[in-house]
Image (spheres, rainbow, N blue to C red):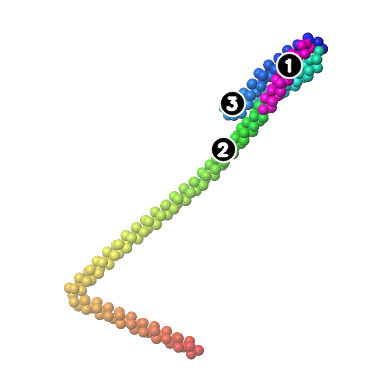
Amino acid sequence: MDSGDWDDLRREARRLEGDLDVRLSSYGKLGAGYADARAPVSESHWKSMEMEIENLLERLLDVNEAMSRCAPAATPAAAVAQKLTRHRDILHEFTQEFKRTKGNILSMREHAELLTSVRNDINEHKASSGAQLVPSLLRERAAIHGSITQIEEVTNQADAVKGVLAAQRHTFSDIQGKVKHLSERFPVIRNLLGAIKRKKSKDTLILSAVIAACTLFLIVYWISK
């Protein structure tokens, strides 16, 4: 190979290096899209750019190897060796930058997919909980309404009974007052009431004695058997 071949290879290397610089810059910006939900990244676009960069790196590697084979015949030797080393360094830097950016993009992609999965799970849980909560609330509301209705019915019945008892108490009070008034005005009635009361007490005593005697008789009969 002559110096013309070396010069052609250097021009091809510089062109590939320029293309890689542009592609890697765009690739890095593309990765930022995974961190921004407002600008979703197309899977096909990402894969296409990745394959394009890998192809450029392979071509630049081939050119660098060709330059290494051509370098001994090129002059001046020191300048050629220095330039070859520089091209190799650029290739190494581009390769490391591509690997680093690719790793960051993969991490951001996994993070975005995880967030999307969590959001979907939360939305599904909210939808499921809401669907189950509505019938439950309706049942509780119906049960509370039924309880309130029963309480109102019991309260109304209690008020009615209270009214009846109050009326009866008033009636008994009136009768008692009238009887007392009559007994005060007519001593005969008072005496009659006293006699009735005494007779009632006497009948009660007699009935109690009869019951006691019968009970005693049954006990004695049961013991004697």
Above or below for 143 versus 38: below
Kindly identify which residue carries mark 1: 82
Q: Which of the 4 image quadrants contains residue 205?
A: bottom left
Determine the main secondary structure of the stretch shown in magenta.
Answer: helix
Residue 132: horizontal and vertical position, in percent? 54, 44
Kindly identify which residue carries mark 3: 39
Q: CA distance from mark 3 to mark 1?
A: 44 Å
Q: Earlier in the sequence, mark 3 or mark 1?
A: 3
Q: Residue furthest top?
A: 4
Kindly identify which residue carries mark 2: 123
Residue 63 visible here: no
- For marks 3 and 1, give the one nearer the viewer: 1
Q: Identify the disc placed on residue 213.
A: none
| Residue drawn at x 51%, y 44% as measured from the top left | 134
Residue 103: horizontal and vertical position, in percent? 67, 30
Q: Nearer the viewer, residue 40 or 50?
A: 50
The stretch in magenta equals 74-100
Q: Earlier in the sequence, mark 2 or mark 1?
A: 1
Whether 86 is among the magenta residues is yes
